[in-house]
């Protein structure tokens, strides 16, 4: 796993009238700070990325659909330099993916219909804080399972 990435299985409480999905507690070790929370949707087969945040820590949760996340570490001083980590999150694999600043992230919709992620970000959005590059700039086989 990429240095600094934390995979946290989350509590899902089944209820006959609708399930309860836990997200994040301030008392958890992977919590750093709160800036904003937002949802992003992605269509099946589509890929968004690559994006690298200079300051923001991401806390990614997928309550609807299924999304494959790929993280690439190009930090020269990292013990996982040059490595990839891949995670698929969904209600069936309900977890939170904490992604540190300084690594590249891209994601693909792999659920049949609506694929929705929640990012509980450590800081508010700042367009100057992140950088993007085309998906072709990082060599990764998206069809590889």
Image (cartoon, helix red, strand yellow):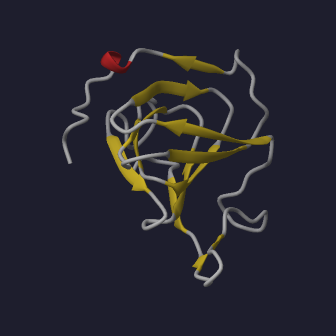
Front residue of 128/1: it is 128
Q: Quadrant of residue 133?
A: top left
Q: Position of residue 10 (x, y in %)?
A: 57, 70
Residue 18 is left or right of residue 139, and the answer is: right
Question: Furthest residue to the front?
Answer: 17
Residue 118 is left or right of residue 68, and the answer is: right
Above/below status of 51 relative to 18: above
How many numbered markers are drawn? 0
Residue at (50, 65) in percent of width and height: 94
Q: Quadrant of residue 17?
A: bottom right
Residue at (46, 59) in percent of width and height: 90
Q: Position of residue 64 (x, y in %)?
A: 52, 55
Q: Quadrant of residue 72?
A: top left
Q: Position of residue 52 (x, y in %)?
A: 54, 26
Residue 69 is left or right of residue 123, and the answer is: left
Front residue of 64/120: it is 64
Residue 77 is left or right of residue 137, and the answer is: right
Residue at (79, 33) in percent of width and height: 124
Front residue of 117/113: it is 113
Above/below status of 51 relative to 109: above
Q: Position of residue 45 (x, y in %)?
A: 33, 35
Above/below status of 5 relative to 142: below
């Amino acid at each position: 796993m990429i240095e600094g990435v934390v995979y946290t299985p989350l509590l899902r409480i089944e209820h006959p009238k609708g399930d309860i999905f836990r997200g994040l507690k301030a008392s958890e070790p992977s919590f750093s700070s709160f800036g904003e929370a937002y949802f992003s949707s992605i269509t099946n087969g589509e890929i968004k990325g690559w994006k690298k945040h200079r300051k923001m820590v991401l806390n990614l949760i997928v309550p609807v659909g299924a999304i494959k996340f790929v993280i690439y570490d190009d930090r020269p001083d990292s013990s996982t330099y040059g490595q990839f980590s891949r995670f698929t999150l969904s209600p069936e694999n309900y977890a939170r993916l904490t992604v540190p600043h300084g690594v590249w992230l891209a994601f693909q919709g792999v659920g049949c219909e609506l694929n929705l992620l929640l990012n509980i970000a450590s800081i508010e959005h700042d367009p100057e804080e992140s950088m993007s590059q085309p998906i072709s700039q990082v060599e990764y086989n998206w069809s590889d399972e």
